[in-house]
Amino acid sequence: SSKPSLINKDKINFVYAGEIFSKLRDVNPFIGALNDIKDKNVELYNKLNVMFFGNIDDEDIKNKLMQVENVNVSPRIPYDEALGYMLNSEVLLLFGNKNSKQIPAKIYDYFGADGLIFVILGDENDPIKDVVLDKKKCIVVNNNSKEIEDGMKRRDCFLLTILLLTTVNLKISTLCNIGQFYYLCDFDRRALL
């Protein structure tokens, strides 16, 4: 089947499919991290395509997200359409719940997809930690702008993304970490296999 319409094959696609209840999930640090990346590393920022699907109960937060150029905010979509986005995205966003014992069920959908899972903990007692810590396909960060930004720049995030971005015979441009610096590099996925 064809790729969902908002997937951009030339970018690193981040998807969040679910509700944002501001009392449980604080996305302000994530917005801050995107704005910090834009200020400090415009090459990385321009490679990001971030998609939110679902209701957001706080209009101010929704408007803040919509003001970030590389973020697309859409209402809730049917499950099979959301699954199409999950299966075609390189990074699956998960916001843990603060002051809650609930583990978001979407983590199990995410484990069934190929993408990297980027977990932003709700708080230090978030029970999702037990499910995602020390899993190779998970990057786990606390919910503050600095850790989120650092997590988005981690070398393993890009190495896994390189493998996910292309088909076997396609050359791609992506970001490559050398020391503390990020460069746009061309990779031929065949050389990595």
Image: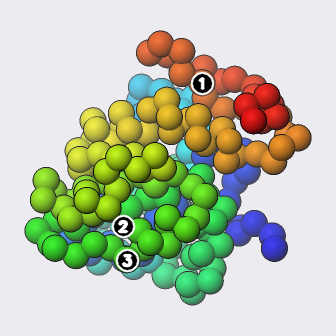
Residue of label 2: 62
Residue occupying image coordinates x 76% and y 45%:
166
Element class at badge 1: strand
Depth-wise, is mark 2 or mark 1 nearer the camera?
1
Residue type pointed to by label 2: Lys
In the displayed structure image, the side of residue 136 where residue 191 appears, left or right: right
Give residue 5's position: percent from left, percent from top.
71, 67
Residue occupying image coordinates x 71% and y 69%:
4
Residue 54 in sight: yes
1 or 3: tag closer to the N-terminus: 3
Q: What kind of colouring is applied to the model shown?
A: rainbow
| Residue 144 against residue 188 in the figure, above or below | below
Residue of label 3: 105
Tell which of 5 and 101 is nearer to you. Answer: 101
In the displayed structure image, the side of residue 95 where residue 124 appears, left or right: left
In the displayed structure image, the side of residue 90 where residue 118 appears, left or right: left
Element class at badge 2: helix
| Residue 176 against residue 89 in the figure, above or below | above
Tell which of 124 and 67 is nearer to you. Answer: 124
Tell which of 157 and 61 is nearer to you. Answer: 157
Q: Which mark is residue 176?
A: 1
| Residues at marks 1 and 3 touching, judged by CB atoms closer than 8 Å | no
2 or 1: tag closer to the N-terminus: 2
In the displayed structure image, the side of residue 67 where residue 21 appears, left or right: left
> How many angstroms separate mark 3 from mark 2 (CA)?
23 Å
Based on the displayed image, in which of its 4 quarters is residue 40 positioned? top left
Element class at badge 3: loop
